[in-house]
Image: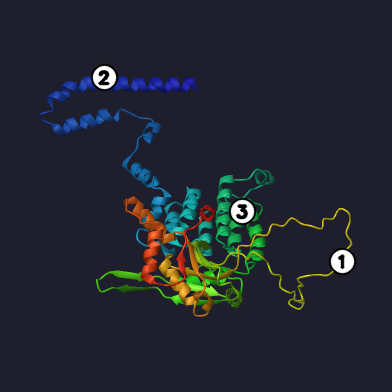
Amino acid sequence: MKSVRCLLHLQCLRLLDQSARSAAQCAPLLQSSSSSQPSVLHKTQHQLLRQFHSSPAWSKSQPTPADDHKKDKSLVTNDDLFEQVAKDVKVKATFNKVVDVFLNRDVRRRGHVEFIYAALKKMPEFGVERDLAVYNKLLDVFPKEVFVPRNAVQRMFNHYPRQQECGVQLLEQMEEYGVMPNVETKVLLVQIFGKKAHPIRKYQRMMYWMPKFKHVNPFPVPLQLPEDPVDVARFGLARIANDLDAKVTVYQLPCTDITETGEEITIPHVVGIQSPSQMELLAKHNPNKPVFVEGPFPLWLRQTCVHYYVLRADPPEEKVEEPYDPERSLYYPLRLDVDFGRDLGDEENFDVEDLDEGPVFAMCMTGRGDQATLNQWISGLQENNPMLGQVPTLFRVNAGPQELSASADAESGHAHRPDTETRSEEKLQRDGEPGVIVEEEPQRRQGRNQ
């Protein structure tokens, strides 16, 4: 190899020497004919230049304008491709258009793994994260019959691990959003990775477990929650209620009103729920002991968080045991009078910690958690529960979601916040409702809520 390189080097030196000699001989001729014959000068220069030869490697290393244009195209990332194609509207049609653009850009589909990862990340933005056809279209991006292992050794050593991990990641995202694969998904996986690859095993596990767990939840939550806040409140209250006989009541609908001064006032919605057993408990409540309005407590419905309030009382100091009714439940008796033989090691007493937070009389959801809105709820409850007119009501209400944002804005602007007791006294004087008292939240409960 060294001798070949030396011969090539000597040949190049000879060519350079010959070109230099010819240039020296033609120099006077070029000077004399430069003014009279410019065409002869051009031909002579062209002949001189043609005597220099370059290697093929040197010519390939020099970039051309066409190569620069291709390089600029290759530097476009997959995220930029999604943003360029889907500029205005991000829907399923534009997502499929981006996939088609990538498929038509290169026959060999270079960079398909990076494109699939970027597409999986962009699917929630286009609203296709639960569309089975889109997942099958992404699987179709993989080249077919390229990553299939040819023998047992390749199958043993995880043939093309990067592509298999990408396929498993796609199936895991389908499982996360509850999308069950179909026969087309299996056919694509077999064409891409073969019958014994990791994505096929993942597909088999999904097809075994997902049909079993699909309808196992007795209280399912719909994928698309209603947009109306009153309907969301109805659904949330019916979900957390412990009685099927509980009745949902809409005490106030949301609306917007304009006063005489031109000020726009938004009235929030108030939706409550109460069961017949809760009405009986409230009727038996001691009028000398107060009831409490507490909240807000969070409730998550899919990706939506709603807040509810409860009307409850302190637990009774002395528990009164009600007489046992043996015919209350024939199939599932509440007590068994059976005398089993005990051993010396059996314990007759069990350390059970009883935590009684008191009875809950009603629950509600509202768009604004201030005292005036909750007073509307209590006033609506008095129609079916006249006992509330005799029982003092204490409010243990923390700042709701809207109140928290309002307080943050006030603190950022260094606004003065009046004292809670002063605001409560002014509201009592303005409302003039007897038996309604505002009480600050105790420290122990504040710590627990935090």
Which residue occupies the foreground of this view, 299 or 118? 299
The tag earlier along the polypeptide, 3 or 1, is 3
Which residue occupies the foreground of this view, 151 or 285? 285
The tag earlier along the polypeptide, 2 or 3, is 2
Q: Position of residue 407 (x, y in %)?
A: 38, 56
Which residue occupies the foreground of this view, 211 or 25? 211
- Can residue 227 be seen in this snapshot? no
Residue found 58% across the figure and 76% down from its top = 283
CA–CA distance between discs 2 and 3? 70 Å
Kindly identify which numbered label has been placed on residue 199: 3
User: Which amino acid type is shown beneath numbered disc 1?
Assistant: Asp
Verify CB contact (< 8 Å) between mark 1 and mark 2: no
Residue found 56% across the figure and 48% down from its top = 163
Residue found 44% across the figure and 51% down from its top = 106
Q: Which residue is mark 1?
A: 339
Picture quadrant of residue 93: bottom left
Residue found 22% across the figure and 19% down from its top = 24
Left or right? Give the position of 68 relative to 32: right
